Amino acid sequence: HIYLFVYLLRWSESPEEAPLEEESEAPRAFVFLLCAAHMSAHIPLVCHGHSRPIVSLEYSKETPDGTFLVSSSKDGKPMLRDATTGDWIGTFEGHRGACWDATLNDPATHCATASADFSAKLFNAITGDCLHTFAHKHIVKTVCFSQCGTKLITGGSEKVIRIFDLRKLELDSSSNDNSTSTQTMTQPASELTGAPSQIKTARYICNDELILSSCSDNPDLRVWDARTGIIATTLKTENAVTSIEISEDGKYITTADGKNVTLWDVGSFRPMETWKMKYNMESASVCMKEGKFVCGGEDMWVHLHDCANGGEIGEPGKGHHGPVHCVRFAPDGKSYSSGSEDGTIRIWQTPTNK
């Protein structure tokens, strides 16, 4: 594509070298623009800024101010970006270790982060101020806001899922007017115990009534009753689940484990479809609007597939210089992003359905 583009560029500058005999400029301009458009569909926006591997990417919901992308990195500095342009908006400062997860609440006014420094933090996503630090006894790997925005769950190396009531935090903050960031609320509202190994991911589902979790060293997904703390059911997988995504409407779950990408129905907790890949993956994301899913892993490429038959669409996205650790579709489905060991984020345009 690059060679063809350069050739056409030279052709447009030197008419005497044109391969067409017609004097008209129209065919020449048409082919030139067609080639440029074809190339742009395969060239991603590259977002620099992180100095170490990207380990998590999450989009906000669409808001009146736009859609945002928050990234987590081993450099310990989660960053907020414009989801469309990739432009840097700000960095959430304060962690002293790798940041393993970051997420935004529904209106994108607050950001929560999980870190290897034995803490989770709550930030004001508009000002970047740290509002609270939740102290833990070991590495925190995952954070998630409830849909209503009043609760926050954390999980990690302690093998415990903790539920914090953010309404209690607001009361504590109002009684500590001289402090902008406190560590007074270290006691969660409740704890869910019984996971066999480190909690890798935990997400609210079913209107915050249930919590879905995966473990780093064990297969299967566990569905917890958020009220009682009991494991309600277990969803069987072949390998440890490395990626969990909940669809925007809450009806579907997308998981990656080994070479499997599975789409689950939340209502029945049964797999609707499982696509077997040729490579081990770390992350997958499904866009129901476009009927496509994207995945990436150890081969350093970003693969786009058709949900109908599982076939790969076009050539894989190339350019990363290390394993792809995370991929996510934007809420509108018009683009998707990837994060890699090379410390870069790439935003790819979704090809239109013909």
Image: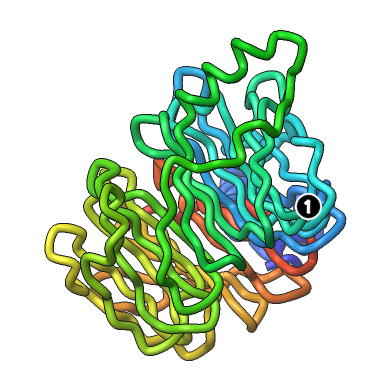
Please indicate whether residue 9 sits to the left or right of residue 231 in the image.
right
Task: Give residue 211's quadrant in the image.
Answer: bottom left
Indicate the position of residue 93 as horizontal and vertical percent values.
80, 36
Which class describes the residues within 10 Å of circle 1: few (<14), some (14-19), or many (20+)?
Answer: some
Secondary-structure class at tag 1 = helix
Q: Check the picture and name the quadrant holding the C terminus.
A: bottom left
In this rendering, the answer to whether 199 lies above or below 145 is below
Nearer to the camera, 310 or 63: 63
In this rendering, the answer to whether 57 lies above or below 315 is above
Q: Check the picture and name the quadrant holding the N terminus.
A: bottom right
Nearer to the camera, 246 or 226: 226
In this rendering, the answer to whether 233 lies above or below 137 is below
What residue do we see at 56% from left, 56% from top?
142
Please indicate whether residue 175 sits to the left or right of residue 170 in the image.
right
In this rendering, the answer to whether 204 lies above or below 231 is above
Indicate the position of residue 141 as horizontal and vertical percent values.
61, 60
Q: Name the residue under label 1.
A: 15
What residue do we see at 36% from left, 79% from top?
220
Is residue 40 in view from this perspective?
no
Which residue is outermost to the left?
268
What residue do we see at 25% from left, 46% from top?
209
Amino acid marked by disc 1: Pro
Nearer to the camera, 137 or 322: 137
Please indicate whether residue 287 sits to the left or right of residue 250 in the image.
right
Is residue 158 in view from this perspective?
yes
Task: Give residue 216's quadrant in the image.
Answer: bottom right
What residue do we see at 67% from left, 77% from top?
300
